[in-house]
Image (spheres, coloured by chain):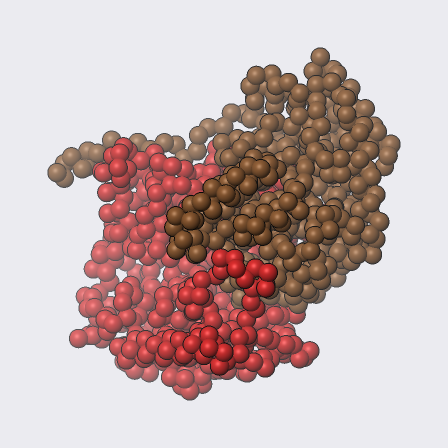
Chain colours: A brown, B red
Amino acid sequence: SLQEKEELIEEWQPEPLVPPVSKDHPALNYNIVSGPPTHKITVNGKECINFASFNFLGLLDNEKVKNAAQASLKKYGVGTCGPRGFYGTFDVHLELEERLAKFMRTEEAIIYSYGFATIASAIPAYSKRGDIVFVDEAACFAIQKGLQASRSNIKLFKHNDMAHLERLLKEQEAEDQKNPRKARVTRRFIVVEGLYMNTGDVCPLPELIKLKYKYKVRIFLEESLSFGVLGEHGRGITEHFGINIDDIDLISANMENSLASTGGFCCGRSFVIDHQRLSGQGYCFSASLPPLLAAAAMEALNIMEDNPGIFRTLQEKCKRIHTALQGISGLKVVGESFSPALHLQLEESCGSRENDVKLLKRVVDYCMNNGIALTQACYLEKEEKCLPPPSIRVVVTVEQTEQELDKAASLIKEAAQSVLN
Amino acid sequence: MANPSAVCNGHLHHHQKQNNLLKSGISKKNGIAKGIKKNGVSNGSLSKKAFIEHFEQAPMYVAVLTFVGFGVGTIFGYLRDFMRAWGLEKRNIATEREQQKDFVPLYQDFENFYTRNLYMRLRDNWNRPICSVPGPQFDLMERVTDDYNWTFRFTGRTIKNVINMGSYNYLGFAETDANALKTVAKELQKYGTGVCSSRQEMGTLDKHVELEQLVARFLGVEDAMVFGMGFATNSMNIPALVGKGCLILSDELNHTSLVLGARLSGATIRIFKHNNMQSLESLLRDAIIYGQPRSRRAWRKIIILVEGIYSMEGSIVRLPEIVSLKRKYKAYLYLDEAHSIGAVGATGRGVVEYFGMNPDDVDVLMGTFTKSFGAAGGYIAGKKDLVDFLRTHSHSAVYATSMCPPVAQQIIRAMKCLMGLDGTTQGLQRVQKLGKNTRYFRRRLHEMGFIVYGNDDSPVVPLLLYMPGKIGAFARRMLEKNIGVVVVGFPATPIAESRARFCVSAAHTREMLDTVLNALDELGDFLQLKYSRYSKAAHPELYEETRCEFED
């Protein structure tokens, strides 16, 4: 009755819009960097050597890149004031797409204005409700969001475990025999990362290619960390393993790590990439990349092409610090020896994740007070599908000298000694 | 039937939502007071200004011809597909690799029917590349097609000084004046172009802190947080604010980013009719009375998602009424001011200022910097608790890189100019110029007899074209006259209501607007686009300059 309805309306109390956040939540007391986050970085007022920003090739501070950006600023201003479809396509975007496609030796490339949105828009453009996606457990958050937006069936396989993946594929094959009509229209994809951000190791691409042709699944490769790092010329994991790039259906990477710009791109054959121009949500419904960032990315590409030696240098530095960090009591190194983004995890957990995080924070603070800027790898604890253990992120860049690498390693050893014992 | 004497004090007022096109004419309204009572829950005293919106329906023959047009296109589409399948016609699109021919096809043929056959014919009107700053005029790269829009090639020439009626440059901050960009160039030299880290790790620069404080001050709220991409601001923060067990009430015509954010959050979504307060109220009542669908438990929270200005309609949200509804039913309000921040309001503070309301009434104020500030990125502002929560729990803060410093500096200088902190009144002048340009442009279009949707004060001006053939003709002929316009069709708009959308800018001079209006006049006669039955030309005796004010 009307009276009862009014009473119900009166009585109902919603939750507060946001739950209160305690004052000493670690994320609220974040580090404020004054000045540019380059090799020498000023964090919270202290000058340190930067081991935390993903500036692998040191291009953040490069004069040529800055000059290219300045020239573009003079010509185009800052923003593009429109999405790609409505006069937001500039000649710099078209040029950058061509350059990226040529560099990666694919037919076509497409640019997004934000790294996170790249893979999160690419996956739902192809995989819809009813399709099947096999994804590694350690996939990064952007991939998880893309999968969630696509509403497809997700099948997780254990990290880098090809046997488990093959078992899942076989199960799927058995299902298909039961319902061949449905199987003929269900698309299948495998989504893997070249260099995993959460664990620092590479995916076994040659085995994946074999599985691809055996079970007729398409491969989407996310190369945010491996673009500009692996391979003789920096073309990523396909060059590292010597695989024909046409075997991979879609390669997605962001330009925020090695290229020291902002945004992301996808490259592959025109048959695959062209579809995103009408159905990639982050492409069609969002403003395009500011031209000065596109010009900076182009100049960075030029530098990468002109000095292929930097990749070798970077790999040597990675190996050096990987060996230097072995044997620290209480901390173990997680990641391949040639990966520039390593994790340092506690060998033995103290029991609760909170305490682990606090302990690692003390290590990080010790290092920061002594001139090495480190950070903990941050995750959204409630949202991740497979939450990695807490860890300290160590990033190697081409600008760090050997003394600095050694200093960092010895400092971390000291910190671990004093904090964990 | 359609009684032209439905007039209030001499000002013609059609206050009708477009429902289906086959209903001809507008229903009778005995004056404005009844109209407002019908669509507003509370009394009109909350909005002291005249809220005039137009959504005129087209005459019946237009609807019929539109559907005929689409029908012909579809028939030809099937014919072409048939010819392509049988090899009678060349296939121009890229095809799958030989080695992968026995894989499950990546695209279903039917999904792409519309793209292949109807969109391809008109493709040259979109994605037009430009090679200058997107100010009031720009330079377009000339491109031609040899095979009916399947491929394009650039001739190398540029078409100079095309009047720009398509870019979202409301306050004219997309400029290359060296003086204006002095600080941006300096910051670019100092900081470089990237940040290479997320906000929570090593990516919070002092520039971000400065920008956030400025944004909070500009909007008159406690705190704000900025993000690197406007689209991502919605899609990454709505899931952080609501989850399972919550209810989202979203407007019919909300932007894709809001829809994506709502879907990703996992909450239940219910849609209310565009700007329709009864629909919203009935949904609210049902939600509170009946609770969640199966368990009948109470909802954890209810959040209403609306936009300030809707970009395809040009309508402004009815903020006073929504705020009173939200207070009565204890819901939360999320306002996306992507197009309205900087563009409406006496000093450019958005719809909150336009209606003379308090920013505290809106729980979550969201906006983007792409449109009025000539930069990129988005922000969320509100109470300190809200922003602290987002700093810790937003997906963007943890996993996505932060905004790059030169872009942040551009926003800072644009905002300082708007607030008058740089010592000049340039900001205020821009806002006023935009208002003048908007009103002039809309008035002239109405007088000429075009059907134009939206609120009289919104700088987004959609002009209805309806028929698919006219979409292409309109855009191409305007380009021949050196004017760049944006045309939109299905799926961004309902299938029978394709339109051309103009974005008026403060940088447009009166001469530019006159050039555009004269060209529109000519083209309107040539293409027979003047569908409106209420124009000055049709009923000159009804037009006087008095406006209605309501007191209630």
Residue at 74% from the left image edge and 18% from the top image edge:
A329
- Is residue B512 placed above or below A271 in the rendered structure? below
Q: Position of residue B46 (x, y in %)?
A: 31, 50
**Quadrant where the C terminus of chain A is found in the figure:** top right
Q: Nearer the viewer, residue B311 or A134?
A: A134
In the rendered structure, the answer to whether residue B393 lies left or right of residue A378 reads: left
In this rendering, the answer to whether B48 lies above or below B58 is above
> Considering depth in this image, is B404 or B209 the residue closer to the camera?
B404
Q: Position of residue A170 (x, y in %)?
A: 50, 43
Residue B131 image-quadrant placement: bottom right
Q: Residue at x 72, y 47 (%)?
A: A241
Indicate left or right for A66 with B37 as reference: right
Front residue of this view, candidates B465 and B156: B156
Q: Position of residue B88 (x, y in %)?
A: 49, 81
B196 or B84: nearer the viewer:
B84
Q: How many marks?
A: 0
Q: Is residue A112 left or right of residue A4?
A: right
Relative to A162, B536 lies left or right? left
Q: Residue furthest left?
A: A1
Task: Please tell me which residue is depicted at 33% across the width and 57% down the height of the picture.
Answer: B274
Q: Residue furthest bottom?
A: B526
Visible residue check, residue B275: yes
**B289 shown above or below B345:** above
Query: Seen from this angle, which residue lies furthest right?
Result: A403
Is residue A119 shown to the viewer in this render? no
Quadrant where the image shows the N terminus of chain A:
top left
Q: Position of residue B64 (x, y in %)?
A: 29, 78
**Residue at x 74% of width, y 15% of height:** A418
